[in-house]
Amino acid sequence: MAFVRKCRLLGLCSRRLAHVARTKHQTASSLFTPDFVQQYHPWGVSARFSSSAHEYGFDSTIFALSSGHGKCGVAVVRVTGPHASSAVRLLTRRPVLPAVRRAALKRLYDSTGEPLDRGLVIWFPGPHSFTGEDSCEFHVHGGPSVVTSLLQALGNMEGLRPAEAGEFTKRAFQNGKLDLTEVEGLADLIHAETEAQRKQALRQMEGDLSRLYSDWSRRLLKCVANVEAYIDFSEDENIEAGVLDDVEREVCQLREELERHLSDGRRGERLRSGVQVAILGKPNVGKSSLLNAVCQRPAAIVTPVAGTTRDVVESAVNLGGYPVLLSDTAGLRETEDIVEQEGVRRARQRAQQADISVLVLDATDVMAAVSRQPGHYLTLQQYVQDHIPDLGLQGTTFDTNDGTTNPTDSYLIVVNKSDLVDAGGSLGTLLASSELATEGDGARDGDVCVMSCLTGEGMDGFLQLLQLKVKLMCGNPLAGNPSFTQARHRAHLTACLQALTSYAGMCERDLVLAAEELRTGLRHLGKITGKMGAEEILDVIFRDFCIGK
Ligand SMILES: Nc1nc2c(ncn2[C@@H]2O[C@H](COP(=O)(O)OP(=O)(O)OP(=O)(O)O)[C@@H](O)[C@H]2O)c(=O)[nH]1
């Protein structure tokens, strides 16, 4: 009876614990170790609440330049921690703090009493601050000497130290002001380079993803509680079996929602890290010229010598607000040259990783092949298969029924050097006969662009088509449910889905073990938002921040 009471006190299921103890050949009460309780508690014990302020260094007050480095009109220096109010008093040489969250124009002094600058001081008492602690901001003139003197004055104060990268945000997380998905959204917002990235990051920072996962966690927690109650009390408290039917329905519904969320074609991840576009083709067809034309700078070397590009040359571009990482690759051909062989291997590897492959052909080669063909009839697909066999490229296969192609991978064909052929004549006939697979929304897989990197003819059409494909891939970041944006989200969501599927498969056979799967699912959802087990990923996430953030 003492065992049952202890279980209830800790919020644990006594029957389940007894079952676990039997499978481990241990006495049930020997399981009451802190680690075990942490692991088996229905909603885990949040690291956030179990660790002391000292452990996180919260007893120190930190400061940093939060605006960019270098000369600027206004520089912002932030301070957070228990001594923030002293910092304001000492720098302003006034015993009274400024009005809360109001900008106050003050003269600032260094430790010798020399005036430093005149600037705005904003006082944010905790817990209504970004970090949840007492904080303040100094908006001073952005000259290097002013900033250095201000940082020195702060550094000379008792109990203050310079902040580490991401430490302000880390404190906001540890104080429950932001969860991990919101922290990640903030980091993405700081690093966002395109409009679509900014929109997605802002949405995540404002808690859209967090709300979705919190809702799932809440519903799953209710399922866990109901199953636990049924296991624990069904015999003596007359709990109806209908409760398990409700749980089954809810788990089924959650599985459907998770599946839908996971099968969005990695749009959030692609938007966050940039859509990978690989430029492929035989040597000398104009791949490097195409890269240079798109990014409007001589990123890759262009010469008439076949095999000039040996390695992958990358360039990031902003295509209509969407981030694209373009890769020029070595020309695909059989070669004895070991350096070029390695280049070709890397080109094929890049093609496998690409979200979109751009296959570049030389219009003069294509037309020569047409004229050699009996009846002068050839489709582009035939040309590619005959002249660049064994592409080994995902998405560039023309057999759309083989089931091996990832439907979100996409490709388009560029027939370059149109200035050297009669584009309206036999080339036009060839294109009209090409079979194109429909991709939806106006873009088609295998779309063909006829263009000339030399004259610029057809370039606009190519860019429009590429942009359309990129947009289709990333979607509208503001429409519908938010997308997950990181591989770690996907890993935990997949694990959660697996756990719920296991529950459905075993709940009729062994409810106690099945309940364990629900807890596993809950733990994985909690790890995404950082509500539990966050320690191991904290360093990875905060590593991406800079000082002062
Ligand atoms: N006439 C004409 N020449 C072009 C065009 N595009 C590229 N070229 C020329 O074709 C040659 C090869 O161009 P690159 O861009 O280096 O071709 P590549 O496919 O990167 O070549 P590799 O490095 O060998 O793989 C250069 O002399 C270019 O000036 C075009 O549209 N028209």
Image (spheres, rainbow, N blue to C red):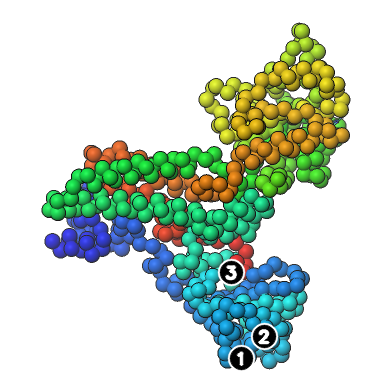
Which quadrant, please, contains the C terminus? bottom right
Which quadrant, please, contains the N terminus? bottom left
- The label number, if any, that marks residue 94 in the structure image: 1
State the residue position of label 3.
Answer: 164
Q: Earlier in the sequence, mark 3 or mark 1?
A: 1
- For residue 482, say whether it is visible: yes
State the residue position of label 2.
Answer: 106
What's the residue at 67%, 46% (across, down)? 322
Q: Secondary structure at mark 3?
A: loop
What's the residue at 46%, 66% (across, down)? 176
Front-most of residues 134 and 312: 134
Q: Position of residue 211 (x, y in %)?
A: 46, 55
Q: Position of residue 286 (x, y in %)?
A: 80, 32
Front-most of residues 39 and 449: 449
Q: Secondary structure at mark 2?
A: strand
Badge 2 crowding class, 10 Å Cα cut-off, few under 14, some 14 to 19, many 20 or more, is some
Badge 3 crowding class, 10 Å Cα cut-off, few under 14, some 14 to 19, many 20 or more, is some
What's the residue at 75%, 72% (across, down)? 73
Cα distance between the residues tagged 1 and 2: 10 Å
Relative to residue 522, is residue 393 drawn left or right? right
2 vs 3, front mark:
2
In the picture shown, does residue 483 fall above or below 116? above
What's the residue at 41%, 53% (across, down)? 215
Q: Amino acid at mark 1?
A: Arg
Ligand 1 found in image quarter: top right
Badge 1 crowding class, 10 Å Cα cut-off, few under 14, some 14 to 19, many 20 or more, is few
Relative to residue 225, is residue 456 drawn left or right? right
Q: Amino acid at mark 2?
A: Lys
Which quadrant holds residue 302?
Answer: top right
Asked whether disc 1 touches disc 2, contact meaning CB atoms under 8 Å apart, the reply is: yes
Q: Amino acid at mark 3?
A: Glu
